[in-house]
């Protein structure tokens, strides 16, 4: 499977939930570039940006500068 690197913006509280449950529940949204993720981080106050691997055929989110992807399945969250 071909994968791409994407960046997921989250909060500390949500990160703790990911660690506890072992996954991120859907929809899992992420940005294709660190610049877009950084902008989202500043605008939302979510200070944590995670680097994830999505399948290359992950759906694009409409709008969002055509630079966001979404998974509609659980994302297994391992050690960080």
Image: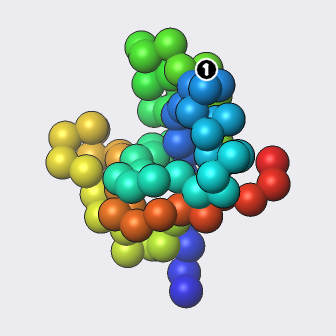
**Image check: 48 left or right of 3?**
right
The answer to whether any part of residue 16 appears in the image is: yes
Q: How many marks?
A: 1
16 over 22 or under it: above or below: above
Q: Quadrant of residue 78?
A: bottom right
Percent across and percent down for residue 31 are 45, 44
Looking at the image, the residue that sits furthest to the left is: 62
Percent across and percent down for residue 66 are 27, 46
**Image check: 64 left or right of 14?**
left
Q: Residue at x 56, y 73 (%)?
A: 3
Depth order, front residue of 33/14: 14
Percent across and percent down for residue 44 are 43, 16
The answer to whether any part of residue 49 appears in the image is: no
71 over 11 or under it: above or below: below
Q: Residue at x 48, y 73 (%)?
A: 55
Q: Residue at x 64, y 25 (%)?
A: 12
Q: Residue at x 25, y 50 (%)?
A: 61
Q: Which residue is mark 1?
A: 47
Percent across and percent down for residue 14 are 57, 33
**Image check: 10 left or right of 20?**
left
**For the N terminus, which image quadrant?**
bottom right
- Crowding at label 1, few (<14), some or many (≥20) Cα neighbours within 10 Å? some
Q: Secondary structure at mark 1?
A: loop
57 over 80 or under it: above or below: below
Looking at the image, the residue that sits furthest to the right is: 79
Q: Quadrant of residue 10?
A: top right
């Amino acid at each position: 499977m071909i994968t791409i690197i994407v960046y997921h913006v989250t909060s500390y509280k949500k990160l703790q939930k990911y660690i506890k449950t072992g996954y991120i529940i859907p929809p899992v949204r992420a940005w294709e570039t660190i610049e877009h993720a950084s902008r989202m981080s500043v605008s939302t106050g979510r200070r944590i940006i995670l680097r994830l691997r999505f399948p290359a055929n992950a759906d694009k989110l409409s709008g969002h500068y055509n630079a966001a992807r979404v998974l509609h399945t659980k994302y297994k969250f391992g050690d960080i």
